[in-house]
Image (tube, helix red, strand yellow):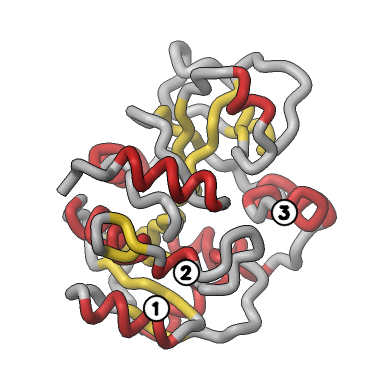
Amino acid sequence: MKTLIIIPSRMSAVRLPGKPLLKINGLSIISHVFKKAESAKIGEVIVATEDQEIIDDVKSNGGNAVLTSKNHKTGTDRIFEAFNILNENNIDFIMNIQGDEPDIDIDDIKNLDTKMKSGISKIGTLAAKINNEEMYQDENLVKVKIQDPFEKNPFPCAEYFMRKINNKDNVYHHIGIYSYEVRTLKKFISFSQTKNELKHNLEQLRALDNGININVMLAKKSPIGIDTQKDYLAIKEIMKYKI
């Protein structure tokens, strides 16, 4: 079974414009993510972007990227266009890794790919334990509620994704990485955005609203997604001494 990793990226993020090309240890955020994905050695890695400057940066750092439309409403729509541009017919799974998590754990990428190839899921994602109250209250931090505790089921279905929570039972930090069976990705893309998705700005709700299960694997750690200047400064400090 063959996996293709596609990393969607764009310069026009609302909360932190231009973040893909912000530097950490002299390397752009998007190129850090590309190199992490490549290090997992589970398949070819491509960046999908609407911005030529991102393509130039990725290629100058040894990566590969394709130019996509500026009209996409979500990252998943962007990766699907990139997949069509690449026109590779022998791919079984497409892994969507967010371009703003440069400290994502390589083993978590590998483990999710292995779990997907066991054939028990159409869409798989990651979640990590929430360690403090501030994380529960942070609406920039997406949470997932799982149907069964990880102790009973190592790959349970997601019950719901949210930014605000009412109770903490079986609630984890959702990590922005998805692995799609190719047929399921095509099905997902065929659906219009749902009211839930638009209301909460969470595209994964489109799958749940249309009866597609998303299985969740427990990650080794909770990486910082870079949504704000505060996040950027925090991850710069964490990665200061990493090579």
Q: Is residue 153 above or below residue 73?
A: above
List the residue tagged with mark 2.
Answer: 9
Residue at screen point 40% across, 64% down: 22
> How far is the residue under mark 3 from the one under mark 2?
17 Å
Ranked by sequence position, the earlier of labels 3 and 1 is 1
Q: Secondary structure at mark 1?
A: helix
> Dot 1 corresponds to which residue?
54
Q: CA distance from mark 3 to mark 1?
A: 24 Å
Neighbourhood count class around disc 1 (C-alpha, 10 Å): few under 14, some 14–19, many 20 upward: many
Q: Find numbered disc 2 in the image and state the secondary structure of the residue it sits on.
A: strand
Q: Residue at x 36, y 60 (%)?
A: 29
Circle 3 packing at 10 Å, graded few (<14), some (14-19), many (20+), is: few
Query: Which of the 4 image quarters holds residue 72?
Result: bottom right
Secondary structure beneath label 3: loop
Which residue carries the number 3 mark?
A: 201
Instruction: Tell us which disc is closer to us: 3 or 1.
Output: 1
Q: Nearer the viewer, residue 51 or 159?
A: 51
Examine the rendered structure and indicate whether residue 220 appears above or below residue 205: above
Q: Left or right: 174 with respect to 109?
A: right
Question: Closer to the camera, 111 or 184?
Answer: 111
- Closer to the camera, 180 or 12? 12
> Which part of the image, by quadrant, shows the N terminus?
bottom left
Q: Position of residue 17 (x, y in %)?
A: 57, 68
The answer to whether the residues at label 3 and label 1 have Cβ atoms under 8 Å apart is no
Q: Please state which amino acid type lies under the numbered disc 2.
A: Ser
| Circle 3: residue type | Asn
N-term-proximal mark, 2 vs 1: 2
**Type of the residue with mark 1:** Ile
Asked if residue 91 lies left or right of residue 70, the reply is left
**Disc 2 to disc 1: CB gap under 8 Å:** yes
Which is nearer the N-term, disc 3 or disc 2? 2
Which x, y percent locates residue 192?
Answer: 75, 67
